[in-house]
Amino acid sequence: MQQPGLHNRHRDKNGEISKKHGNTLVRTLRKIYGAHFAQGEPDTAKLSDVLQTIDAPSLSALVHDHEHGHLESKIAQNA
């Protein structure tokens, strides 16, 4: 059974959920969350840039917005 909020991330030896680093490229995130993840952002954009652009607190918030069809409109508003 998958634990809520993990989004295919894993727990490290201390039981903490592994986090994506701010320097993770959107291209990498698209391999995980789909080709349309953060549409409007270039493949070479960093996670930290996208978070800052739309004032999002975390990757989990981006994934939530993406799954509910809100992420792309937030990106477009801040472009």
Image (cartoon, rainbow, N blue to C red):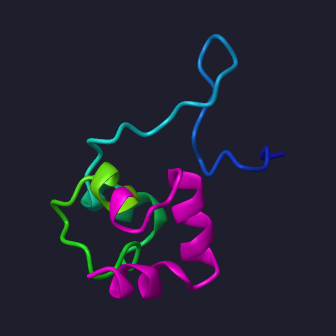
Q: Is residue 21 positioned above or below 32 on the image? A: above
Where is residue 52 shown, x and y percent of the image? Answer: 35, 57
Going 32% across and 49% down the picture, which residue do you hit? 48
Residue sitting at the far right: 1
Residue sitting at the far top: 14
Quarter of the figure with residue 34: bottom left
Is 8 left or right of 29, judged from the image as shown?
right
**Secondary structure predominantly adopted by residues drawn in magenta:** helix
Question: Magenta stretch?
Answer: 52-79
Going 43% across and 83% down the picture, which residue do you hit? 72
Quarter of the figure with residue 67: bottom right
Where is residue 8 shown, x and y percent of the image? Answer: 59, 47
Total labels drawn: 0
Q: Quadrant of the N terminus?
A: top right
Going 62% across and 52% down the picture, which residue do you hit? 7
Where is residue 58 shown, x and y percent of the image? Answer: 52, 50
Q: Is residue 74 positioned above or below 58 on the image? A: below
Q: Quadrant of the C terminus?
A: bottom left
Going 34% across and 87% down the picture, which residue do you hit? 76
Is 47 left or right of 41, judged from the image as shown?
right
Answer whether residue 31 is magenta in the image. no
* Residue nearest the observer in this picture, 37 or 47: 47
